[in-house]
Image (spheres, rainbow, N blue to C red):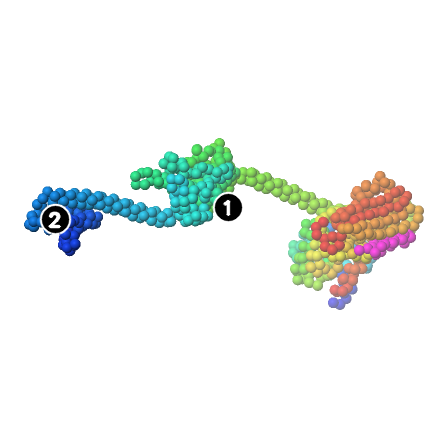
């Protein structure tokens, strides 16, 4: 207030001083031009001074100047013939008053002009200032900003807008916004109406719909979020529009991620639930509803003990304590109670949830119904136990069988041995006994005992072959095997005049004893079941892919076709006591061959000799792994 | 030892089968072995003998022990083991006369040192030959 008054006083003094000074200057100038001007134009210099004052110092100064000028001019320059007479005539008065009126009128006019001029200049300055501020603001905004005039032509575009639109402010300025700024619906691809006319028409703030995208000149689209608002001047009149828009690619992506995660949680077959640190449920997905039977509405806000089994309710505080310590609990197996009261086995993973400040705010649980797994495991365990017990039974049975074979071979042999030796002793106790019948009877006894011993020995050999044995690691030369067999059968070969011819046989990975038994049985059969001619036995071998194929062929009596598949059955014989035999030889051959993974069969016709064929996998040649 | 051939040899026989005992007697006789045969028919009694306990407390070790492996009560291997553990029986030859045995039995028998292992033969001549074998055993150690 004081300052204003001071200011006014100062300005008054300046104006007053200027008026005095201007009047004085005008007087001096009028005296200076007196010799040339004479009595004419007495007030001319005051007139000029008044106009100047009016422009620069205001109407008040001009009034002072006109007042002083009228007085001084009337006294000194309004000169008549008679000196000393001031304002002597009516003409003088008319001149003074006319000057005053004209001067004041023009001064007033100038003063008004000046005032108007000043005001306009101030307005312009203010506008310029505002515009500078506006531009600085636009530049500092992180969003893209474009302003338009009432015709929708670009006025400003900040740097973000320029880079998003791929243009410069210079290029855009004054051009219709539509040329640079085209918005489409991201889904349909249809172009959307510009926001500018809507803003101008309604005067309201208008926004773009969701899923809008900026279509750039090169055809790529950028999802944007756009708002347009009117710009109003001080008088509230709309002078243009301002558009603020931003690239929402990142936000859209984040939203999509959130949606995706939410849909994963919702569609999960597992129960995915969260609870706060008080143990109250905060989320409850469909999987949880499926497993536990409760809906989200029923469970949110409820304590976690709602689904705990009664006896295990005290687990929950312990779990909460571990979660609060930031621990993650993996594969926690628990029993839970469903809405229907059923108890189910679940596997749970519990992890702490952190808030934005990194504090633990709750826990998330992923629970899986493992009832089926648990049942399957139980069934498996049961099946294993059953298998184990049947294996044990089988092992016991095998042991019994081996034991039986041992008993059969040894304990049954003992009484036979006694019978044999004592019948021999008996025969020797009656030397030269005239009654030959005694010796004949003793022969039957010893023969029967011997046959029984042979039978038992064969039975033992057959039983022992059944026992699981380890695979041999040594190689066996089958040519040497055949030599030994020929040696063993020497007596019957010589007796019958048999010939045995053999091809060169391979070296194979088998137990020698097994193949001695095999070849001895086959060759002795060939001799035993001879025809009318001398026995001829041929042993041959051929190598096929993956196995050896052996053959033992004879020229004997042959085997009728219908019995070919019965001859390998233990104790099955085709002949009576006229040809001795236990009926176990071919069964032994079959066991030997099958033990090494091969196959044995016979080809024959009655009266045309027989050929026994068997295969042996070549794997048995190098390294026998399993059978 | 002087006059060894004049003194009757003392043979200890553990055998439960009286048929075999008789055959062994015949075999020894046919080999002209003049001996006293002490026969026990089960493993328990055989153990008493080789440990020199019970009714055999004052018995001297024999000149030859002949054992069957398959004896009632305690088996022949136990008897053999106890015999080897008794130092008084040191130097007594042992012959096992038995029917064919399981491999582990044979292995144990061999580890306990036997002087002869003779499978019981199913032929009279072979049986009689046992007498000769036992006679040789007596001769080498007397």
Q: Nearer the viewer, mark 1 or mark 2?
A: 2
Does residue A447 appear left or right of residue A190 in this picture? right
Does residue A282 appear left or right of residue A504 in this picture? left
Q: Earlier in the sequence, mark 1 or mark 2?
A: 2
Image coords of residue A596 (percent x, y) = 75, 50
Image coords of residue A408 (percent x, y) = 75, 46
Report helix, strand or loop for mark 2: loop
How would you rate the neighbour count of disc 2 (Cα within 10 Å): few for under 14, some for 14-19, many for 20 or more? Answer: many
Q: Name the residue nearer the viewer: A353 or A356.
A: A356
Residue bearing the label numbered 2: A78
Q: Say whether residue A415 is visible.
A: no
Name the residue: 77% across, 55% down: A508
Q: Name the residue nearer the viewer: A549 or A534.
A: A549
Residue bearing the label numbered 1: A218
Q: Say whether residue A88 is visible.
A: yes
Q: Is residue B104 magenta?
A: no
On screen, residue A497 above or below A332: below
On screen, residue B87 above or below A69: below
Name the residue: 43% across, 38% down: A194
Report helix, strand or loop for mark 1: loop
Q: Are marks 1 and 2 on the same chain?
A: yes
Q: Name the residue nearer the viewer: B23 or A4.
A: A4
Identify the subunit bearing mark 1. Answer: A
Spatial CA distance of label 1 from label 2 is: 86 Å
The residue sitting at the bottom extreme is: B2
Which residues lie in the magenta part? Answer: A482-506
Check contact, mark 1 vs mark 2: CB within 8 A.
no
Q: Is residue A503 magenta?
A: yes
**Number of numbered markers:** 2
Q: Which quadrant of the structure image shows residue A277?
A: top left
């Amino acid at each position: 207030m004081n300052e204003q008054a001071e200011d006014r006083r100062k300005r008054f003094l300046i104006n007053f001083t200027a008026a005095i000074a201007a009047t004085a200057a005008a007087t001096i100038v009028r005296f200076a031009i007196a010799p040339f001007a004479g009595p004419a134009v007495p007030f001319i210099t005051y007139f000029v001074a008044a106009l100047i004052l009016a422009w620069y110092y205001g109407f008040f100064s001009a009034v002072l100047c006109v007042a002083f000028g009228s007085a001084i001019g009337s006294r000194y320059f309004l000169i008549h013939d008679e000196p000393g007479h001031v304002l002597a005539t009516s003409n003088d008065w008319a001149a003074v008053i006319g000057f005053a009126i004209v001067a004041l009128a023009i001064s007033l006019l100038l003063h008004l002009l000046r005032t108007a001029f000043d005001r306009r200049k101030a307005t312009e300055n203010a506008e310029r200032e505002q515009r500078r501020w506006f531009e600085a603001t636009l530049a500092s905004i992180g969003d893209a900003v474009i302003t338009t005039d009432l015709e929708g032509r670009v006025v400003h575009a900040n740097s973000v807008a320029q880079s998003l639109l791929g243009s410069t402010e210079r290029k855009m300025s004054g051009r219709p916004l539509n040329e640079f700024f085209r918005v489409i619906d991201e889904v349909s691809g249809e172009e959307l109406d510009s926001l500018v006319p809507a803003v101008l028409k309604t005067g309201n703030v208008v926004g773009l719909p969701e899923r809008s995208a900026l279509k750039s000149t090169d055809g790529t689209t950028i999802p944007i979020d756009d708002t347009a608002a009117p710009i109003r001047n001080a008088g509230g009149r709309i002078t243009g529009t301002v558009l603020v828009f931003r690239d929402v690619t990142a936000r859209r992506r984040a939203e999509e991620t959130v949606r995706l995660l939410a849909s994963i949680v919702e569609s999960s077959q597992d129960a995915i639930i969260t609870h706060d640190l008080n143990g109250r449920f905060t989320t409850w997905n469909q999987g949880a509803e499926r497993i536990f039977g409760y809906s989200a509405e029923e469970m949110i806000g409820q304590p976690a003990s709602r689904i705990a089994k009664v006896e295990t309710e005290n687990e929950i505080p312990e779990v909460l304590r571990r979660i609060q310590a930031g621990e993650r609990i993996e594969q926690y197996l628990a029993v839970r109670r469903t809405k229907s009261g059923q108890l189910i086995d679940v596997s749970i993973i519990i992890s702490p949830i952190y808030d934005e400040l990194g504090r633990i705010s709750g826990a998330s649980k992923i629970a899986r119904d493992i009832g089926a797994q648990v049942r399957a495991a139980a069934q498996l365990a049961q099946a294993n136990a059953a298998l184990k017990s049947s294996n044990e039974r089988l092992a016991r049975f095998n042991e019994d069988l081996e034991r039986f074979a041992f008993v059969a071979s040894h304990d049954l042999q003992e009484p036979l041995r006694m019978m044999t030796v004592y019948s021999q002793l008996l025969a020797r106790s009656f030397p030269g006994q005239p009654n030959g019948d005694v010796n004949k009877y003793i022969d039957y006894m010893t023969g029967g005992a011997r046959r029984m011993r042979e039978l038992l020995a064969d039975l033992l050999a057959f039983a022992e072959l059944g026992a699981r044995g380890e695979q041999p690691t040594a190689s066996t030369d089958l040519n040497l095997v055949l030599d030994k067999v020929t040696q063993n059968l020497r007596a019957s070969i010589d007796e019958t005049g048999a010939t045995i011819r053999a091809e060169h046989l391979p070296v194979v990975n088998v137990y020698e004893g097994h193949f001695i038994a095999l070849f001895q049985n086959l060759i002795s059969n060939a001799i035993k079941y001879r025809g009318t001619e001398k026995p001829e036995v041929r042993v041959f071998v051929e190598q096929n892919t993956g196995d050896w194929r052996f053959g033992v062929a004879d020229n004997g009596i042959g085997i009728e076709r219908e019995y070919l598949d019965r001859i390998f059955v233990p104790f099955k014989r085709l002949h009576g006591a006229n040809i001795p035999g236990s009926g176990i030889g071919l069964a032994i051959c079959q066991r030997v061959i099958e033990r090494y993974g091969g196959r044995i069969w016979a080809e024959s016709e009655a009266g045309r000799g027989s050929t026994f064929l068997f295969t042996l996998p070549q794997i048995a040649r190098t390294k026998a792994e399993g059978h | 030892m002087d006059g060894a051939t004049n003194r009757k040899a003392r043979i200890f026989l553990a055998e439960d089968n009286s048929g075999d005992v008789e055959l062994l007697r015949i075999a020894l006789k046919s080999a002209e072995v003049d001996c006293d045969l002490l026969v026990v028919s089960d493993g328990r009694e055989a153990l008493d003998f080789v440990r020199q306990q019970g009714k055999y407390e004052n018995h001297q070790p024999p000149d030859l022990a002949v054992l069957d492996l398959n004896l009632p009560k305690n088996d022949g291997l136990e008897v053999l083991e106890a015999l080897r553990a008794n130092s008084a029986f040191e130097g007594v030859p042992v012959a096992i006369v038995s029917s064919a045995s399981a491999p582990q039995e044979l292995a144990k028998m061999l580890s306990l040192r036997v002087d002869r292992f003779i499978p019981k033969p199913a032929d009279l001549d072979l049986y009689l030959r046992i007498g000769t074998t036992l006679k040789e055993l007596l001769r080498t150690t007397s």
